[in-house]
Amino acid sequence: MATDILTCNFFELFDVPVAYELDFDQVQQRYRDLQKIVHPDKFVNASDQDKRLSMQQTSRINEAFNTLRQPVDRAIYLLKLKGVDTVQENSTTMDAAFLMEQIEMREALSEIHSAEDPLAELDRFSAQIKTSMQGLMQNFSECYAQEKLEKAQELIKKMQFMQKAGKEVDELSAKIEDELY
Amino acid sequence: MALLQISEPGQTAEPHQRRLAVGIDLGTTNSLVATVRSAEALTLADESGRHLLPSVVRYGVDAIEVGEAAIEHAVNDPSNTIVSVKRLMGRAAEDLISLGKSSPYTFSTSESSVPKIHTRSGDVSAVEVSAEILKTLKARAEATLGDELIGAVITVPAYFDDAQRQATKDAARLAGLNVLRLLNEPTAAAVAYGLDSGQEGIIAIYDLGGGTFDISILRLRQGVFEVLATGGDSALGGDDFDHAIAEWILLQAGYEAVPGASLVRLLIREARSAKEQLATTESVDIAIETDDLKWQGTLTQLQMRELIEPLINKTIMACRRALRDADVTAEEVLEVVMVGGSTRTQVVREKVGGFFKREPLVSIDPDKVVAVGAALQADVLAGNKPDDEMLLLDVIPLSLAIETMGGLAEKIVYRNTPIPVAKAQEFTTYKDGQTAMAVHVVQGERELVDDCRSLARFELRGFPPHVAGAARIRVTYQVDADGLLTVSARELTSGVEASVDVKPSYGLTDSEIETMLRDSMDHASDDMHLRMLREQQVEAERVVEALDAALQTDGEQLLSATERSNIDQARQQLVEVSAGDDSDAIKTAIKQLEGACEDYVARRMNSNIRNAMQGHSVDEYAGKDQE
């Protein structure tokens, strides 16, 4: 059984099915249980060798946890398990309508400063991005389950766009807050 | 060899005496030491009954004074009396100049690029000054507890960067302390509160000390403290309130010259006293009478509020950001814990309560709460509570990046990633025939390397020439549980490697630390040998005990006859050597035994994980009741 922390896949490590939909409560529970066994705090008085092993294993558990909990990273990882390297793959085409929407959103964001209540406006953007993201995640989940990997890859690209937009909204909010205080 | 012990919790608790460990809060203004005695964590007092040790060190004519004895000289001997040294930890000379508007010290840049403060007993670094404070606390603990310490948990602001953490660890080593863990102050405070109330949910820790501000958002569940996000400002604290008030006094008095060091110290002392009185009264009279300046006036609550409000607003903004990073709302926060002496200020409590829309918790003395939490963690780490469920999962406060073309910082480990963590990224060459690559490690959130903190530079040399873009250089960042970074680089087609422990350019080099340690211990070297021998003998005993217990449980199943005989042989060797008086030989024999057990340890670990993965709960496995 492939349960070696350093070699098994992230889904096996967290004892969840290899699928996009995730029981996040279970993942968190498993995270805590695994950490209680391998965390370096359990090896403070141990030999250097055990300490090193504990650090490697904890690092891997943290990497797995981070990958599983982030929607884009989880999707990329799932495709990687199928032998598709999304990071290297740049040939995916994007549909024009989606790109148009993105451009419009960027334009709106660049003018946000002059809005009546920029923070409220940004909150609205943030909610909109969350909704779009959820739709994309739903789509990805279905495509992945049906082995439509090319479509799945395109969805990852869209999610990456959305994630980037979300980050920009956050950064803009932070900047405007800075100016307010 | 804790790995060998994990499945025998009953046997690890063999009746050896309690291992003495302390928690130390190395603060900007005051420092404390605490320990767990009779199941309760208490701060330790000096012989006059004082718990707080002012973080002040004076390099006097014949002796070094620390604490109250030094504080009296802050005004009359400012250049030899170092206060708030924590603000100088892990900083470069140029950082100090910008901090130094009110600094009375003369800095000299030394060869190792560590800025040093010029005193009458020579040039001292911030690490050395901090070590004096730690030595005093160590001596206090050993005098109170009547035995040597096996180690200490030392707290640092969550927002400390790698350089500042490394400097703190160096100071502890210099003071002769074994650092069990560097623990983030807010996490320590959460431990102090969490264990008392047994609550579960999201907790915000607002920690405003003398010179640093931290905000941490934690999730507490089943004894696990999981830090979700942390933020703050490592150069903002109650000291800034004092400065703001002192500047106000100068302004009111119409004083236009640049005030001398003595006057600044005096004004700050008056300002602090006024601030402290205003925690309980509406207004306070201030009278300054020196050769330079005669002034008297009244500072009201309202006036002070106006002076310090901009500073508090900065902290509220950091709270907002931390909530966003943690992806929780202010409404989801169950409790807000106040830490640090500066949270005694009324305005601070009001503003924080207003932001989180709930009354902040102040039931544990905000000056002592961090030390108390650190002591609880130290007790667990020392192995005194083998069955304890408590576990602290911390994060890295600031992103770690690498310099790429055009002076850009490419993030490799993002802030708020749980630690320990390892992250690798591949890079390539940009010139034909290139055989070396410079690696510049930085920390911070900004896009340009120049706006980030430079941590280390090293070069990977001697890989075979390739056409541009064909070499594959994998750079790996490994952050340990103390939040300290190691970076390695490897050219994958040739296997050429290079690595560095990120010793920040502003810390001390290993050889500097060794020289200092040797200097301070020359006269005590015989004691040292005895002590090292005893330490190694105790360690050998523990290793053998753990191994025997493990072998008894599953040696049969997990080991072949040859492996077993190798282990037995190494064990025998260790037993024989530990009867002698050569500590190095014992150390080597321990290493050899550990080497012989390497595969066995890994197999035991995997069999443990397998059991956990098969749906057996970890608690059940550890022979404990399930929750």
Image: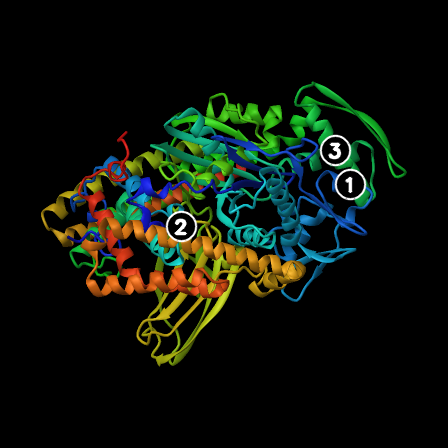
Say which element carries label 2: loop
The residue where tag 1 is placed is B264
Amino acid type of disc 1?
Answer: Val
* Distance between the alpha carbons at the discs numbered 3 and 1: 12 Å
Q: Position of residue B475 (x, y in %)?
A: 38, 64
Instruction: Name the residue: 15% across, 56% down.
Output: A82
The residue where tag 3 is placed is B248
Does residue A157 appear in the picture of this structure?
no
Judge left or right: residue B46 versus residue B576: right
Q: Of tags 3 and 1, which is closer to the observer? A: 1
**N-terminal of the two: label 1 or label 2?**
1
Q: Position of residue B395 (x, y in %)?
A: 42, 45
Amino acid type of disc 3?
Answer: Trp
**Chain to which mark 3 belongs:** B
Instruction: Name the residue: 57% across, 60% down.
Output: B529
Position of residue B400 relative to residue B467, above or below, is above
Quadrant in the picture for residue A138: top left
Q: Quadrant of the C terminus of chain B?
A: top left
Badge 3 vs badge 2, beta-carbon distance below 8 Å? no
Say which element carries label 1: helix
